[in-house]
Amino acid sequence: MEPIVLAYVGVAFMVGLSGIGSAYGLTICGNAVVGAMKKAPEKMGSYIGLSALPSSQGLYGFVAYMMVQQYLIADISWINAAGIFGAGLLMGFAGLFSAIRQGQVCAAGVAATAAGHNVFAATMVMAVFPELYAILALVVSILIAGTFGG
């Protein structure tokens, strides 16, 4: 196997898994929004604010790709390919799971808001916690790319 193949598998994990996580997280919260619209349609602004949060992990995966893209060359070294693969696993799985869990937190906030509870701000704060791990994975992926030789 050529090292470039390993690097591209890493990119697939990086972008694919974080995007899949965002899609799942958005769907989880979107389903809650549909149910909440039946109870309290006037709170749609709050619902949209919460339901959009899980989309960021997919963007982080794309940003991580942009950071390693310049190293995806035909004669990439094994060490750089392994670094991209590792960064891809890290970013992909952190993005996948944090987006799904963030969607669940946001869905609970949507349901509570629809039930008449004033929990929008608290839900936003709680939803940041799973996202911090996707941000951490992005930062580590950037730091990994920073170690590659030109």
Image (cartoon, grey):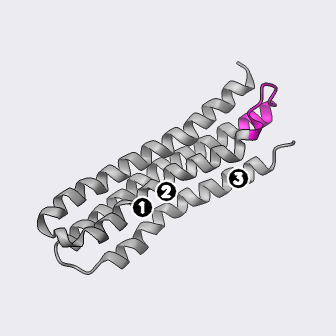
Asked whether residue 105 is in view, the answer is no
- Residue labelled with disc 2: 56
Amino acid type indicated by mark 2: Ser
**Residues drawn in magenta:** 70-82
Whether 147 is drawn above or below 108: the answer is above
In this rendering, the answer to whether 48 lies above or below 12 is below
Q: Secondary structure at mark 3?
A: helix
Residue located 72% across and 35% down the image: 82
Task: Look at label 3 and name its amino acid.
Answer: Ile
Height in image: 88 above or below 104? Answer: above
Residue 140 in percent (x, y) is at 67, 54
Q: Residue at x 60, y 54 (%)?
A: 137
Few, some or many residues within 10 Å of mark 3 (<14, 14–19, 20+) = some
In the image, taking residue 145 as reference, residue 20 lies left or right, namely left
Point 74% across, 26% down: residue: 3
Q: CA distance from mark 3 to mark 1?
A: 22 Å
Residue 115 position within the rendered picture, expressed as x and y whole percent measured from the top left: 16, 73
| Residue that badge 3 annotates | 142
On whether residue 67 falls in the magenta region, the answer is no
Numbered disc 1: secondary structure:
helix
Compare marks 3 and 2 and give the one earlier in the sequence: 2
- Residue at position x 67%, y 25% from top? 5
